[in-house]
Image (cartoon, helix red, strand yellow):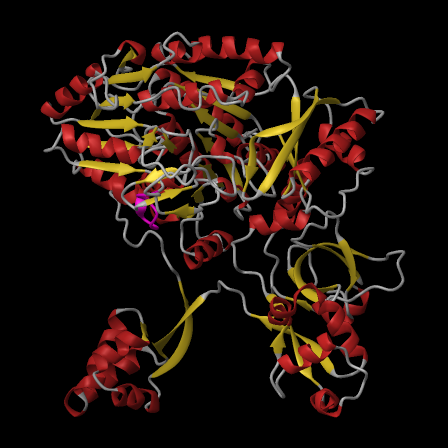
């Protein structure tokens, strides 16, 4: 082992801030033995002390005067070298600060934090009364906010005194009237410890003591017997219950039979989720061929991206399970990504039924402590399979042997905030770094993945038929333009769909209905003057939530009570327009009063187990009809569901987003695929005002290939992904003029760049104002093989965000949402 003086004396630290480069710090001699990449450190940053991540040690640097690392927070690295390299590559590709990517890779809430505290000096206590030191009004005001011997946080002073606080503190420190110190705060999320008692004598000695104490001290004997039965350790609360009195416990401690200990307690998200073990199922010929190819790549430890393209109900999950079983026999681990939190309990349940307790779960709906404990289980090697959403792609699996990305087409894999990474694409990078196959599964592959499979960059494995006796459902498209309308009643269910629901209920089968809008009505309009009730901070209408008695913005969550009259003309002729899931639920209750009906959307699944509880009722047969938003269309497998309906296929179809058609086709196909997954033939009804649209026609015929041909032709004509790379630059400001001017300046600069970038825009974003900020955007294009991100970064080096106007610039590489 190297002596501390011989170890590297300098460290590069990545900070979870907007700083887009690492900072170099000196490592003091007493910390050099503990310094290692992947550990968290406390470092000074300006006047603050912040938590960062040590990413590289260096023997020498050219800078002579460096600040020192103040402390190292971890006994062992939280990230190993492969995970550090993964986070670095993600940061480089998406143009995000390395520290923010590392923070996203770790459980939230574990970072230590600090706060700056202000204290009066002895001289400062007397200064206001003595009138010395030539103090100004604001300086006196600050001193009077401080009490003797009490430290006041700088943040509190800033709230009271505003932006002048730092300069005031600087002047008063120079006059030695106050001091500023840094106090460390514990992490918000920590390992939970529980007080227990354990036996410290041999089993023979304890049994002899039990025989001796049975008559003299029966409570002590009973407690010792119970400790032996449970393995020698009991939580303190159970000890007190059995003992009946603390004196019994103290007596055994005095006799030297037990001692108190603190032990870590695991907060288990599976504690209320029992499962029944299952065995592997027989495979069809296409399944066997797909599995053979995946197993060969896994056995050879080769990175091969597979596109597992199978119709709904074709048995993709069984291939995942059997491929993972083979990987585990090699002593390696598996990572399984799903797009939605609603899918994780069900997916984890299927994997636990096959593999038992070697499955861990990672997603943001877990309690923070549960999430930390699951992450620690994975890191200790107690789990071989991790099931989770987007962020689980960074799970600490050192022996990774296969990565599965289920429903790989789903836009939920794209992170909306910085770092704006795509979970599917990061999974591919991780597979490359760890030399393992990555399986991308979908019935409606993303056009990017399908195009790469056509080019031979991915290996295509097709499952063209459903497994067993299941057939694809019969699909009917209803033209709502021709549907008769009843006076005074909103058209929600067509005659065909209503009849289909009644027939399904008569057969004691279940029904799923999709409407991808929550709330009761999507807008409130004054029919006298045309005033539309809008959000004051966003350019969108407010949605009526009748049950809650509010109108609400679905972007910034602003809400208010619905007005009794028009806020503009004071008229009372207010009309509710548009349709939401809440209104659908009420209509169903009217039409089918004896049916058991539930609604599944963000408003009804807010609790930790919200999704799981609704889906459990559906699985148990306690629901006849489930209506909801897109979360009911993804990945669910319930054999008794034989009728599905899409109430409005046009929602999203005509959005100003080049992926609108792709998303619509995928959602319709996935929803249709929920029907008839058992032995009974399913029925699906798609209601639309655009029955001849190519997306609707492809969904009617459940024909992905015809849709892909049409959509890819349109994309190629417009030079859009997958035929080009795309970066979106979004400029926002509370001042509309500043946002527009800055966007124009940026567009002019990029067009002047010698690298000849192709620019679309600038223009107002389709959602031109959100959360009080006006939004303009432009797009940079380049061929797929072009290092577009580095070109944009080079061009932006000459761009300075203007002062004033609170200008924000967001860079989104490979954007999924262009609204």
Range covered by the magenta-colored residues:
603-610
Query: Where 163 sits versus 526, above or below?
Result: below
Q: Where residue 206 appears, x then y in whole percent?
A: 28, 81
The answer to whether 364 appears left or right of 588 in the picture is: right
The answer to whether 261 appears left or right of 673 in the picture is: right
Q: Where residue 305 appears, x then y in whole percent?
A: 55, 26
| Residue 279 showing in the rendered view | no
Residue closer to the observer: 25 or 240: 25
Image quarter for residue 371? bottom left
Q: Is residue 625 magenta?
A: no
Q: Where residue 580 appears, x then y in whole percent?
A: 32, 32
Quadrant in the picture for the C terminus: top right
Q: Is residue 607 magenta?
A: yes
Residue at (61, 34) in percent of width and height: 429
| Residue 266 showing in the rendered view | yes
Quadrant in the picture for the N terminus: bottom right
The answer to whether 274 appears left or right of 368 in the picture is: left
């Amino acid at each position: 082992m190297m002596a501390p003086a011989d170890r590297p004396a300098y460290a590069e630290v990545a900070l979870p801030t907007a700083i887009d480069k690492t900072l170099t710090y000196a490592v003091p001699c007493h910390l050099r033995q503990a310094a290692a990449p992947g550990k968290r450190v406390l470092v000074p940053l300006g006047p603050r002390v912040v938590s960062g991540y040590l990413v590289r040690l260096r023997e020498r640097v050219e800078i002579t005067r460096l600040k020192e690392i103040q402390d190292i927070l971890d006994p062992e690295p939280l990230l190993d070298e492969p995970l550090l390299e993964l986070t670095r590559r993600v940061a480089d590709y998406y143009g995000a600060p390395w520290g923010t990517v590392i923070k996203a890779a770790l459980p939230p809430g574990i970072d230590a934090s600090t706060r700056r505290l202000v204290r009066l000096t002895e001289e400062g206590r007397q200064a206001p009364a003595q009138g010395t030191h030539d103090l100004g009004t604001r300086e006196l005001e600050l001193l009077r906010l401080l009490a003797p011997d009490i430290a006041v946080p700088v943040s509190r002073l800033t709230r009271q005194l505003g932006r002048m606080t730092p300069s005031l503190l600087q002047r008063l420190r120079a006059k030695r009237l106050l001091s500023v110190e840094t106090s460390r705060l514990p992490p918000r999320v920590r390992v939970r410890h529980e007080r227990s008692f354990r036996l410290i004598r041999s089993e023979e000695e304890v049994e002899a003591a039990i025989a001796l104490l049975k008559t003299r001290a029966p409570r002590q004997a009973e407690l010792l017997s119970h400790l032996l039965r449970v393995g020698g350790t009991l939580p303190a609360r159970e000890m007190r219950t059995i003992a009946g009195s603390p004196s019994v416990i103290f007596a055994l401690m005095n006799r030297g039979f037990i001692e108190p200990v603190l032990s870590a307690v695991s907060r288990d998200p599976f504690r209320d989720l029992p499962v029944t073990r299952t065995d592997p199922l027989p495979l069809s010929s296409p399944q066997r061929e797909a599995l053979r190819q995946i197993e060969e790549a896994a056995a050879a430890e080769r990175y091969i991206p597979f596109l597992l393209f199978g119709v709904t109900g074709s048995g993709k999950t069984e291939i995942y399970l059997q491929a993972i079983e083979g990987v585990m026999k090699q002593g390696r681990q598996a990572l399984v990504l799903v797009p939605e939190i609603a899918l994780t309990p069900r997916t984890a349940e299927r994997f636990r039924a096959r593999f038992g307790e070697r499955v861990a779960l990672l997603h943001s709906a877990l309690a923070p402590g549960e999430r930390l404990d699951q992450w620690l289980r994975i890191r200790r090697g107690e789990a071989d399979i991790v099931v989770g959403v987007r962020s689980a792609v960074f799970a600490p699996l050192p022996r990774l042997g296969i990565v599965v990305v289920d429903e790989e087409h789903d836009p939920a894999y794209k992170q909306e905030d910085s770092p704006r990474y795509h979970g599917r694409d990061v999974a591919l990078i991780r597979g490359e770094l760890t030399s393992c196959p990555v399986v991308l599964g979908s019935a409606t592959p993303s056009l990017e993945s399908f195009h790469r499979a056509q080019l031979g960059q991915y290996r295509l494995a097709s499952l063209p038929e459903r497994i067993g006796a299941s057939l694809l459902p019969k699909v009917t498209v209803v033209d709502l333009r021709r549907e008769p309308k009843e006076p005074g009643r909103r058209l929600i269910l067509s005659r065909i769909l209503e009849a289909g629901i009644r027939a399904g209920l008569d057969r004691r089968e279940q029904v799923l209905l999709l409407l991808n809008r929550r709330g009761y009505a999507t807008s409130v309009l004054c029919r006298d003057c045309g005033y539309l009730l809008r959000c004051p901070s966003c350019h969108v209408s407010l949605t009526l939530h009748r049950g809650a008695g509010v109108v609400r913005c679905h972007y910034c969550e602003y809400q208010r009570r619905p007005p009794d009259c028009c806020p503009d003309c004071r008229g009372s002729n207010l009309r509710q327009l548009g349709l939401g899931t809440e209104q659908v639920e009420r209509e169903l209750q009217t039409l089918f009063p004896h049916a058991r009906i539930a609604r599944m959307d963000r408003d009804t699944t807010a609790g930790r187990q919200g999704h799981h509880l609704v889906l459990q009722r559906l699985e148990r047969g306690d629901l006849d009809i489930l209506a909801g938003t897109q979360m009911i269309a993804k990945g669910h497998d319930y054999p008794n569901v034989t009728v599905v309906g899409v109430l409005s296929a046009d929602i999203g179809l005509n959005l100003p987003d080049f992926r609108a058609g792709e998303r619509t086709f995928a959602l319709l196909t996935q929803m249709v695929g929920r029907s008839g997954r058992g032995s009974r033939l399913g029925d699906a009804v798609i209601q639309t005002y655009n029955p001849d649209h190519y997306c609707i026609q492809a969904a009617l015929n459940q024909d992905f290939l015809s849709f892909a041909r049409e959509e890819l032709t349109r994309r190629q004509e417009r030079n859009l992904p997958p035929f080009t790379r795309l970066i979106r630059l979004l400029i926002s400001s509370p001042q509309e003029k500043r946002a527009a001017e800055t966007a124009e300046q940026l567009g002019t600069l990029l067009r002047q760049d010698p690298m000849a970038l192709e620019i679309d825009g600038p223009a107002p974003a389709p959602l031109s104002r959100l959360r009080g900020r006006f939004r303009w955007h432009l797009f940079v294009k380049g061929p797929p093989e072009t290092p577009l991100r580095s070109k944009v970064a080079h061009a932006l080096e000459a761009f300075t965000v203007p002062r004033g106007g609170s200008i924000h610039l967001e860079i989104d590489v490979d954007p999924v949402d262009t609204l």
